[in-house]
């Protein structure tokens, strides 16, 4: 399921509420019938994994970074996560491979490589809920497509919230929830929304028409 809409619609707020980066002021957020405020932070971190647009890496090596949130993860899990996030190829092409040094904040890697390593780290934790908050923004369209195709195979039975700038991220999803001003204004797949939603059409056409870049974020 995707949540889409213009800036300020409330999409990123939803992704921040699940891991309790901040709490609701009204109502409640539930996971499997349990209010997230009744789940300990330690347990919540095991349930919810998040990769952000600004990928933060730590001084050390690649293996240290990918296992940072789950040091007891197996190498098999780590490498599977790296394959899903499309970091396996460039890491194994490095002379030191998984022992390759990572500088402070990972600036010895490109922006796209940092994002893929960050997603690999999140996937290594094997979360039940995966949040990718604009975490493919530095990737080219071909790489983004590979990641989108590979992640579902690694995260079987995992709920994924995907925040991205490109509407291409939601075209193939079964259900898209369109938000505006904090409210649901329509629900459907890409074709259905293109048929009946002027707002969705405007976002789609402005992004793919090569004109003004639409300010779109996507949570899927």
Image (spheres, grey):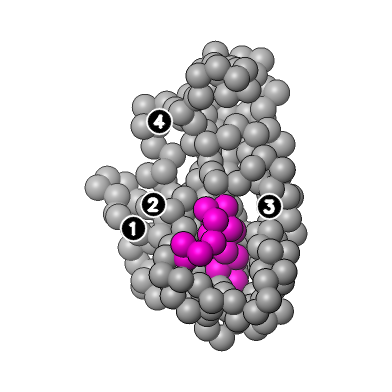
Q: Is residue 121 magenta?
A: yes
Mark 3 nearby-residue class (10 Å; few <14, some 14–19, many ≥20)? many
Label 4 to label 3: alpha-carbon separation: 24 Å
Q: How many marks?
A: 4
For disc 4, the marked residue is 7
For the N terminus, the quadrant is: top right
Q: Is residue 182 visible?
A: no
Query: Would you name the residue on which mark 1 appears?
Result: 21
Secondary structure of the magenta portion, mostly?
A: helix
Task: State the SS at label 1.
Answer: loop
Marks 1 and 3: CB-CB under 8 Å? no
Q: Which mark is residue 196?
A: none
31 relative position to 113: left or right = left
Which residue is the site of mark 2?
A: 16
Nearer-N-terminus badge (2/3): 2
Residue 189 placement (x, y as % from top left): 67, 30
State which region is magenta.
106-125
As drawn, 207 above or below 21 = above
Pointer 3 residue: 147
Look at 46% across and 71% down and name the residue there: 103
Q: Position of residue 164 (x, y in %)?
A: 53, 41
Earlier sequence position, callout 2 versus callout 1: 2
The mark lying in front, picked from 2 and 3, is 3
Quadrant occupied by the C terminus: top right
Q: Quadrant of residue 12?
A: top left
Observer able to see residue 171: yes
Quick check: marks 2 and 1 in contact, CB under 8 Å? yes
Q: Earlier in the sequence, mark 4 or mark 3?
A: 4
Against 103, residue 31 (above or below) is above
Mark 1 Cα within 10 Å, few/some/many (few <14, many 20+)? few
Q: Position of residue 181 (x, y in %)?
A: 37, 27
């Amino acid at each position: 399921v995707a949540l889409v809409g213009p800036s300020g619609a409330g999409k990123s707020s939803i992704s921040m509420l699940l891991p309790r980066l901040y709490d609701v002021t009204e109502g409640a957020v539930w996971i499997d019938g349990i209010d997230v405020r009744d789940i300990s932070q330690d347990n919540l971190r095991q349930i919810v994994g998040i990769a952000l647009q600004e990928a933060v890496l730590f001084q050390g090596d690649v293996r240290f970074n990918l296992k940072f949130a789950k040091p007891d993860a197996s190498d098999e899990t780590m490498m599977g996560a790296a394959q899903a996030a499309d970091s396996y190829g460039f890491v194994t092409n490095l002379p030191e491979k998984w022992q390759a040094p990572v500088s402070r904040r990972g600036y010895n890697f490109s922006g796209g490589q940092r994002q893929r390593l960050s997603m690999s780290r999140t996937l290594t934790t094997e979360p039940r809920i995966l949040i990718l908050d604009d975490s493919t923004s530095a990737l080219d369209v071909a790489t983004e497509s590979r990641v989108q195709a590979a992640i579902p195979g690694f995260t079987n039975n995992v709920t994924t919230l995907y925040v991205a700038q490109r509407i291409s991220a939601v075209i193939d999803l079964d259900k898209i929830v369109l938000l505006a001003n904090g409210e649901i204004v329509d629900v459907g797949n890409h074709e259905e929304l293109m048929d009946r939603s002027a707002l969705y059409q405007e976002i789609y056409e402005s992004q793919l028409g090569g004109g003004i870049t639409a300010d779109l974020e996507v949570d899927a």
